[in-house]
Amino acid sequence: MGSTTKMHSDVDSLKICILGAGMGGLACALGLARAGFKDITVYELASNLGFVGAGIQMAPNMARILDRFGVWDAIFQEAVVLNETEVRQGATDEQMAHIDLKYIKETYGYPHTVGHRATLAGELYEGCKRESKNVKFTFATTCEDVKFGSKPSFTAVPRNGEPYEVQCDILLGADGVKSNTRVAMLRELNVEAEVKDTAQAAYRIMLTREQLSNDPELLALLDADKVIRWIGERRHIIAYPVSRKQIYNISTTQPDVNFAAAPSATYTTKGSKKAMLEVYGDYCPMIHRMLDLVPEGEVCEWKLRVHAPLPTWVHGSVGLVGDACHPTLPHMAQGAAQAIEDAGVLSVVLAHLPSGATPQDINKALKIYEEVRKERAEALVELAAQSGRNMHLGEGEAKKERDRQFAALKAGGGKGPVPDKWADADVQKMVYGVDCMKIAEELATKELNGH
Ligand SMILES: Cc1cc2nc3c(=O)[nH]c(=O)nc-3n(C[C@H](O)[C@H](O)[C@H](O)COP(=O)(O)OP(=O)(O)OC[C@H]3O[C@@H](n4cnc5c(N)ncnc54)[C@H](O)[C@@H]3O)c2cc1C
């Protein structure tokens, strides 16, 4: 599968350009190189990987693909295995649900883990460097003006140099939620799919063991194998230990006030500590102590943006990847996992291209990618939105019903439907139990190889 597919000898020299070196772009480059492609270039507007200091949940569907790409062992070494999850009342710290996650490894082959984004991105990049004969990186270069002829092209604009045009056989737009590739594709197709304002924003915080060292209650959180979500009306906090339990990673979601009036180009801002403490003012004293440990001037707030489902992810020999085509609220912790699934599926379908592949063959392969991925990714985007709505309910019948479900879950020893969708066993089966690369392999074998 993927890397084991026998590729036709002339297919491996197809010129592939990947726009964006986020999780999606890096995973595509690595997956395609391991599948046998020899002419891959990644263009990235930043001058280096420059990843946000934040944690990331690495679900089994992500781990399975990273393992096939040969980088999971290194990532796992630094990861923390989550054995349990809890939902608690933000205001009182009272436990509303406790769910065991230990069964995940036996059922899906990989445990549910959490890690540092820099490690995940760094190992994907290291993997690409091991394939350096076949994967090149061009940093500090913005890609614009994507064109969709029989050979796609774009303008590369180096930060310190003259713009130049690049033509290739296959172009993958992994350029994130603000994707120029998506904008160009929709313009070409004369359709609209606007960026949607979720009205939500997030603080992302990392506290070191040293910062927590004087607070036994907070240290206990760092030492547990647990992800906890504290919920309240219109906002919640999710937190877990990363980096071999040396760092406590905290991510919040609250109504967006700071970006509401800002131009849509703005995605992060230095937040005010006072404002952050006020937003969570009615949360319990332990949460106050935790948030109060963030040094003044180091509060960073993120705008959470998504857009309406696109009519297509593929046009000609151009395909969209990751947040460029399925940006999501983070409440299912699946955004990067889904970008990596995209990469897994692309590495399979493109490896099946026939000898002498024409633009029509490439389009057919990309359409199989879309067939395997689009409905699934969009279902998860919707689930994340729904889960956020469940978590953020204010007083009323819907909240009473949700809390009845939490109570039933508690009475049932953690078995039964979970309003926090990512922790629901049936949802986990649909997310972790599906092997997209295997499905892609079957479809591509049937539809591209004719056997
Ligand atoms: C608060 C929060 C928590 C999250 N938690 C999780 C989690 O626990 N688990 C999980 O799986 N996912 C999580 N996600 C989602 C995940 O971070 C994203 O879905 C994922 O990083 C998307 O990767 P990407 O490569 O598609 O896009 P990006 O990471 O945005 O990468 C796009 C890249 O393209 C570059 N680029 C953009 N435009 C251009 C251009 N014109 N030319 C050249 N380069 C360009 C950018 O600089 C960037 O490097 C979370 C997201 C948020 C906001």
Image (tube, rainbow, N blue to C red):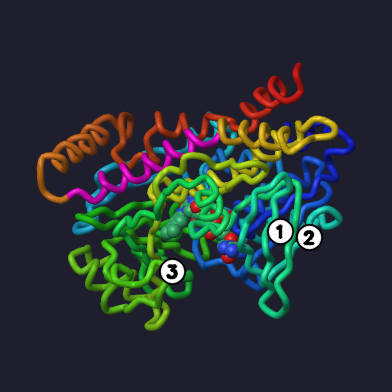
Quadrant of res 441 = top right
Please state the horizontal and vertical placement of residue 267, each as a whole percent of the image: 43, 68
The residue beneath circle 1 is 42
Amino acid at circle 2: Lys
Quarter of the image with the N terminus is top right
Q: Are marks 1 and 2 in contact (CB under 8 Å)?
A: yes
SS of the residue at dot 1? strand
Q: Is residue 219 above or below residue 269?
A: above
Q: Main secondary structure of the magenta part?
A: helix
Determine which of the numbered discs, if any, sits on residue 265 in the image. 3
Amino acid at circle 3: Ala
Q: Does label 1 or label 2 sit earlier along the sequence?
A: 1
Of residues 444 and 354, the one nearer the viewer is 354
Q: How many marks?
A: 3
Is residue 376 in the magenta section?
yes
Q: Which residues are magenta?
A: 373-393
Q: Is residue 450 above or below residue 394?
A: above
Q: Is residue 211 above or below residue 110?
A: below
Q: Does label 2 or label 3 sit earlier along the sequence?
A: 2
